[in-house]
Structures are given as structure tokens and as C-alpha cells.
Amino acid sequence: MPSFDSICVREVPDPRTTKPHILPLYLTSSYAFDSIDDQIQVFNKEKSGHTYSRYGNPTVEAVASKITQLECFDLDHEGHGIMFSSGMAALHTLLLSTLKSGDAVLTQGNLYGGSTELLQKIGPRCGIKPILTDLSDLGNVEDVLRKNPSIQLLYFETPTNPTLQCIDMEAICLLAKKHGCLTAVDNTFATPYLQRPFKFGVDLIMHSTTKYLNGHGNSTTGILVGRDKEFMQTQVWGTMKLIGTNPGPMDAWLVHQGMKTLTLRMDRHCQNAQAIAEFLDDHPKVSFVNYIGLPKHPYHAIAKKQMEGFGGMLSFEVKGGLEPALDFLRKLRFCTMAPTLGDVDTLVLHPVTSSHLNVAPEIREQNGITDGMIRLSVGIEGVEDIIGDLRQALA
């Protein structure tokens, strides 16, 4: 019989007799082996097993598997997904997994500001050169690829954050394959419900799962889903394991809970955003609206071709520039000022003073991220409440 002290310290046997209805939380940093021989076999990959939660966690892997299923839905391949501590951790791991010193990544200037900063400030420290161009101009893209054989990765967003530009994925993937480079897309805005990039030839899909996949603003995680399972299980997993960009199981579990209502939420996000875009498009104090659901939007046709819906994100320009935009923001009473997106409530952001503050002004201006631009992550509240707040703030 163990001592009182030992009974306090030791784990109790798992009393489970039937499987749980909800995915369990595995809140453990490591895993115990039955014997030294068992440990040797697992570490040598002679049999499967968990060792340490930086290497893998059952809760995290279950959620990654579910997101992979969604991205590969109705396709003839399985793919493989790995979760990370944030969308930025996913992007950083993507770069280190696919590129080496001397390589270049071709991308666009109207990415999320943090992505642009990572590519321009951290990438060069690793010997990785970012090349920015207009990815909607396919002739220009081919010219850049031909002149820069060091480009090994083409990374883009569609729709972009915050200008809602859409990239023709099928066309750009054909160009990338012709020149022997991988393609990776940030699918955060659309989610797999509205857009599945593997259908158009993309190699790797990234999400900030903090956003729409979670939907409730209560955890920070990211994911990378790859078409090539072996590459994901070796190169990407090996990089993640060594630089420690893995998420905690609680954060992953919260994403899993949020995804249960993904289709319901996205339908309402789309419905509300369309109504709000039409309201803003008719408002005399708004000079333009970026919403791909508006037929006159320059990327409406591309969005219609590769998306099942137009999403809950839009941006618009308040006439007069910076001061009228700030005045509008100060008057808001119902909508929430917050530097995130994809939650169930409506979130407002001023890019040039927050998400894109550290992006060079010339890059912002070249890509339509103006001083008067407001980004709106439209929530699932009653649409009349959202419009009422926007109306009074613009008045």
C-alpha cells in the first residue's frame, strides 16, 4: 500500500468506461510509457504514440483533422493539417518549412499588416527575400517569376485584408507550377465553407483559426493544411516541433466548439454584410465600398467563380480622409472597436492606425489602404441595429 504522500502525488487510473460525447481536453505536457522498450519504439517511430505536447497532443490533432476534412471536403485527396499558436505562427512556420536562405517569396502589398511586416522584417534576417507585386495582373506575375528564379513560394490572400481584392487561384496556381514554385493562400476571410482553395490547385492553405473558425473571440490559434501529407508530416511538423509554434489544447478545443455553428454563422455574416454594403454604397458620406457581393466591385466576378458566398468582411472609405474617419469611429455606440475579426459581434477597425500602422505609407497607398478606410467585420446581430449605429455615426 503506497504512503499517504504518494497517493496525493500519483495519477489515478483512467475510470472511463464509455467514450465521451464531447472531444476531451488533454491537459498534459507529456505522456507516460509502459516501459523503456515502449518509449524506444515510439521515439524511433516504430509505432505511433504521443511523447510530449510540443510534438503532438490528441485534442489539438483531432481539431486539425476536422479542419483538414473541411478543406478537403468533396475532393479526391485527404491532405494533412497542423495547428499552431496563432495565424502568424502558422505563416512563420510555413516560411521556414518551405524556404531556405537565398530563396524568395512572391506576394502582394495588400496583405494583413502583420504578414507584410513578418515578410519584410523577419524574412530577410533568415535570408528570405520578399518580392511584392500586383498578383491580379497575371502577365506581370509571370514576368516576375521568369526574372526571379529564386522564387520558391507564392503566398497570397483572397479576399485580401482589408481591401477585399480577389486573386484568380486557378490561373495563378498554373503560373506557379509552370515556374516550379509552391502556392500558399490565407483562407481566413472565406473559411472552407465559402471557399476551398485545393479545388483550384493551391498547395497549402493557412488560417488564423482565431477568427471565423472559432467565431467567438476566446482563443488564439492558426492552422496550415497541406495537399502533400508526407511534406506536412515531416518538413512542417519537424519545423513546428523545433521552433515551438504549437498551440495549447484548450485553445484548440475552443476552436472545435466554435466550428459546430460555422455554417449557421457564415450564412448570417454573409446576409448581414450584403445589406450593410448596400446601405453604405448609397450613403453620401461614403466614397466607395469594398464588398465583393456588390456586382460593381472589380473582383465580384472572380469571387463568384471561386466562392460559395461573399463573406462577412467589408471596408469603406469615409469622405474627407483621416479626420472624418476618426470622427465616425468616435461616434459609434453599438459596434465594437477591436483589432480582430470573425467574431459573432460586429467589429470595427481603422487599418492605418492599427493593423497596418507599421506598414510603409507608400505600400499602403499603392494598395488602396487609405487614411479614411474603415474595416468592418460584420456580426450576426440584428442587421437593423448595425445599420442604425453606422447611420448615426456618419450623420
Image: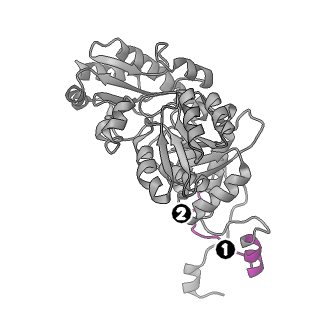
**Distance from Cα at disc 1 to Cα at disc 2:** 21 Å
The x, y position of residue 282, in whole percent, is 35, 11
Q: Quadrant of residue 363?
A: top left
Q: Secondary structure at mark 2?
A: loop
Residue 324 in the image: above or below residue 26: above
Residue sitting at 30 percent across and 18 percent down?
286
x and y, in percent, of residue 5 in the image: 54, 85
| Residue type for callout 2 | Gly
Element marked by disc 1: loop
Instruction: Give the quarter of the image for residue 149.
Output: top right
Three-letter code, disc 1 = Ala
Left or right of residue 39, residue 362 in this image: left
- Neighbor class of circle 2 (other Cα within 10 Å; few <14, some 14-19, many 20+) is some
- Foreground pick, 351 / 86: 351
Q: Residue at x 21, y 25 (%)?
A: 324
Residue located beneath label 2 in the image = 244
User: Which of the pair 293/272 is nearer the observer?
Assistant: 293
State the quadrant of the N terminus. bottom right
Name the residue carrying label 1.
Answer: 32
Residue 337 percent across, percent down from the top left: 31, 37
Q: Is residue 284 above or below residue 313?
A: above
Numbered range of the magenta stretch: 25-42
